[in-house]
Image (cartoon, rainbow, N blue to C red):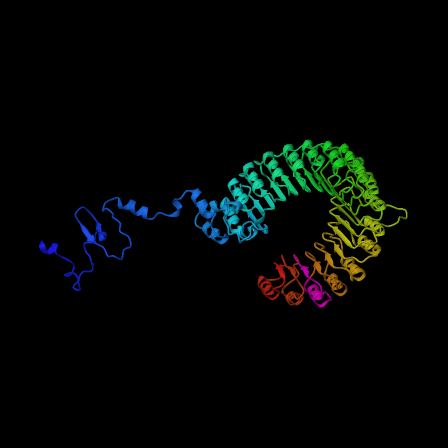
Amino acid sequence: MSKVLGFTGDDFCPGGSIYPNPKEPSLLLSLGRHVDVYFPPQKRSRISTPLNGDWIEAEQKQQTSIDVLPDECLFEIFRRLPGGQERSSCACVSKRWLMLLSNICKDEICSDKSTSDEEEFGGDGDLSRDLEGKKATDVRLAAMVVGTASRGGLGKLSILGSNSGCAVTNLGLKSVAHGCPSLKSLSLWNVTAIDDEGLIEIARGCPKIKKLDLFNCPTISDKALIVVAKNCPNLTELSIESCPRIGNEGLQAIGQYSSNLRSISIKDCTRVGDQGIASLFSAASLVLTKVNLEALTISDLSLAVIGHYGKAVTDLVLKCLPNVSEKGFWVMGNGHGLQKLKSLSIVSCQGVTDTGLDAVGKGCPNLKYLYLHRSAYLSDNGLASFVKSALSLENLQLEECHRITQFGLFGVLFNCGATLRSLALVSCFGIKDLNLVLPPLSPCQSLQSLSIRNCPGFGDATMDVLGKLCPQLQYVELSGLKGVTESGFLSLLLGSEAGLVKVNLSGCTNLTDKVVSSMANMRGLTLEVLSLDGCEKITDASLVSIAENCPLLRDLDVSKCAISDKGVSALEQGNLFHLQILSLSGCPLISNKSLPALRNMGETLLGLNLRNCNGISSRSVGKLVELLWRCDILS
């Protein structure tokens, strides 16, 4: 026993004791009631740990991390980080840290005074980001805010939710409000989980907003729009669509506070009525220039207010207004307030009659563009009267106006004066091909563009008259006119005195090679764009004429035509040094034999369409893709 008590370690270590003072109390670690052992002095700390079940709890206490701190403490730490890179690195640690960092405002950052605020946080807001579908979440939005804060900040943000909903909530918008004070444009589409709280946060945190789009936001109401009006003085563009909780009260606030608003679009908002529209236009501080009103329950009163107070309006769109009658358009025209109106589009408004349109023509002396769609009660007399009154009219488009006949068309050309440059008729079934005997009339020297699309009654007789009335045509589109043959088109061609630049004859199935050859010989030196898509009777002979006579041609479409390898070879051997776009889609007679010619033309081609060319193998197309690396090939 005395040997045991006298043991000093010499017997264990012959060189002597491994501890200079074996009985130093600081080197003892109690493992139990009766056992003491020595530990080497290399250990920096000494911890007394009982050998029982409590050691697990003790080990957990040793692993204590910064995450046990409450949010308030972490917030104080994060706002003292020296720069954006450090904040981004911390945001990668956990979702909790990310959300905390994304909610730190610019004013709460304790940054180096030598670094300007614009450089350190927020910047000029030059970055643009889009979140769509499943990617639109609060976490992704927060990460975007933290990541862009030190690189100029977000200036434009679009959130597009899917039909099944959007994961972005008020929390995500709160991050944007706190982290992107330079935000200038915000678009919210199909965001059902965002309500007034989120938009109010944006209005208070992002006062520089100039453009705001709200589409299908069912939980956003007038309350949020009022806060936007009061806190965003730079707002210049506002678009509201399918927002059932936004109504007259919100528009009144916009009219009162948004003095810089220039463009507004309101669509399918059931609570918007005459009171809201009237408050917008009657506001003394508001100077609207672009207005779009669609699918609203407003009445003639709103059009009367627009006609009286819309002194700065230059672009006006009125669409699907079932409660507006003839009186509304008549009063709008006679209000004499739309003196600066240049563009007017009226779609599916039954109030457009001869009387109403005539008043609009007289009350808008600077009107240059008119688009009428589905005006069921407008006749030839009203159209001719309008053209006489609208002395500045340059562009007229009529679509699905079935009471307009051949007389109305010629009436426009007789009375348009010297300003009309473009005329388009689309799906006007009232036009019938009549053999009219017209007295000698002065031609319309100003008309340069004529577009007739999907008017089945349009035929050679009408084309013959147009050839006499429109000698200065440069842009001709005759699409889907099966009643037009080579006789009618040649009449138009012979009457043309100016050089044709762009010609679209797609869907004119009765046109033959004679038409193309005559056009190439007579007007080929100026022709730049030619479309013969679906002209089944066009063969290689047309391509030969084009190749020989159209040196400036840059866009050629001969899809679904009866052309073969011979025609493609003629194009390659011709003078088409400027050809950039070539479409051969749906030409079954083209085979692999055309590949050498296409390869040679590839020096200038930027686009080549070979879809549904079953005679060309996929392997050959692959080789062509490798050779023509500058050309976008569709197959």
Q: Is residue 566 magenta?
A: yes
Q: Is residue 448 above or below residue 594?
A: above
Q: Is residue 397 above or below residue 353?
A: below
Q: Is residue 473 above or below residue 235?
A: below
Which one is in front, 35 or 625? 35
Can you tell which quarter of the image residue 535 is in?
bottom right
The image position of residue 440, as x and y in percent, is 90, 48
The image position of residue 20, as x and y in percent, is 20, 59
Can you tell which quarter of the image residue 244 is in?
top right
Tell me if 451 is positioned left or right of 267 in this view: right
Count of numbered circles on the image = 0
Q: Residue furthest left?
A: 1
Q: Is residue 160 magenta?
A: no
Residue 287 visible in rendering? yes
Which one is in front, 198 or 386? 198
The image position of residue 403, as x and y in percent, is 78, 39
| Residue at left offset 54%, top offset 37% | 197
Span shown in magenta:
564-585
Which one is in front, 470 or 152? 152
Q: Residue furthest right?
A: 440
The image position of residue 414, as x and y in percent, is 85, 46
Tell me if 613 is positioned left or right of 506 in this view: left
Can you tell which quarter of the image residue 196 is in?
top right
Q: Say which quadrant the C terminus sits in.
A: bottom right
Tell me if 23 is positioned left or right of 346 in this view: left
Residue 350 visible in rendering? no
Which one is in front, 483 or 399? 399
